[in-house]
Image (cartoon, helix red, strand yellow):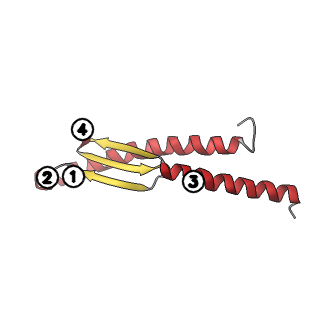
C-alpha cells in the first residue's frame, strides 16, 4: 500500500496539521458592529470564544440586535478565515514547495 517514505510523510503532514490547529486556537479575532455595541470573538479555528452585548437589552430593538450580531459575526468569520487560510497555506508549503 504505502511505502515507508509515504507513511512517514503522511504522519508528518498529520502532525503539522495538528500543530497548525493548536496555533490557530491561540489566535483571537474580533468582529464588531454598531460601534462596539456587539463584539464577537472567534479563534483561528473559527470557534466562538466570546460574545459581548454592550447595551441595555430593554432599549434595543430585537431586529436591530439580530442584525448587529450577524454583522459582527460576519466580520469575525472573515478575519478568522483569512488567518486560517494563511496558517494552513504556510503549513502546506512544508510539504508542497511552490504553493
Rendering coords of residue 31 (x, y %):
35, 43
Dots 2 and 4: beta carbons under 8 Å? no
Distance, label 1 to label 4, CA atoms, is 17 Å
Extreme bottom residue here? 1
Mark toward the start of the polypeptide (3 vs 2):
3
Q: Does residue 63 lie above or below 34 as drawn?
A: below
Q: Residue at x 24, y 38 (%)?
A: 35
Pointer 4: what residue?
35
Quarter the N terminus occupies: bottom right
Residue 30: quarter of image: top left
Q: Circle 3 sits on which residue?
A: 21
Q: CA distance from mark 1 to mark 3?
A: 35 Å
Mark nearest the camera among 1 and 4 is 4
| Depth order, front residue of 79/13 | 13
Q: Tell me the number on the disc at residue 63.
A: 1
Look at the numbered discs 1 and 3 and tell me whether their residues touch, using CB distance below 8 Å: no
Please give the name of the residue rendered at 57% of the width and 43% of the height, measured from the top-left corner.
Answer: 85
Residue depicted at x 27% and y 52%: 52
Amino acid at each position: 500500500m504505502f511505502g515507508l517514505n509515504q507513511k512517514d510523510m503522511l504522519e508528518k503532514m498529520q502532525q503539522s496539521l495538528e500543530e497548525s490547529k493548536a496555533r490557530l486556537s491561540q489566535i483571537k479575532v474580533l468582529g464588531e458592529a454598531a460601534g462596539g455595541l456587539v463584539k464577537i470573538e472567534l479563534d483561528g479555528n473559527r470557534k466562538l470564544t466570546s460574545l459581548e452585548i454592550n447595551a441595555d437589552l430593554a432599549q434595543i430593538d430585537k431586529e436591530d440586535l439580530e442584525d448587529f450580531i450577524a454583522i459582527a459575526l460576519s466580520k469575525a468569520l472573515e478575519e478568522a478565515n483569512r488567518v486560517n487560510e494563511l496558517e494552513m497555506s504556510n503549513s502546506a508549503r512544508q510539504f508542497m514547495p511552490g504553493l
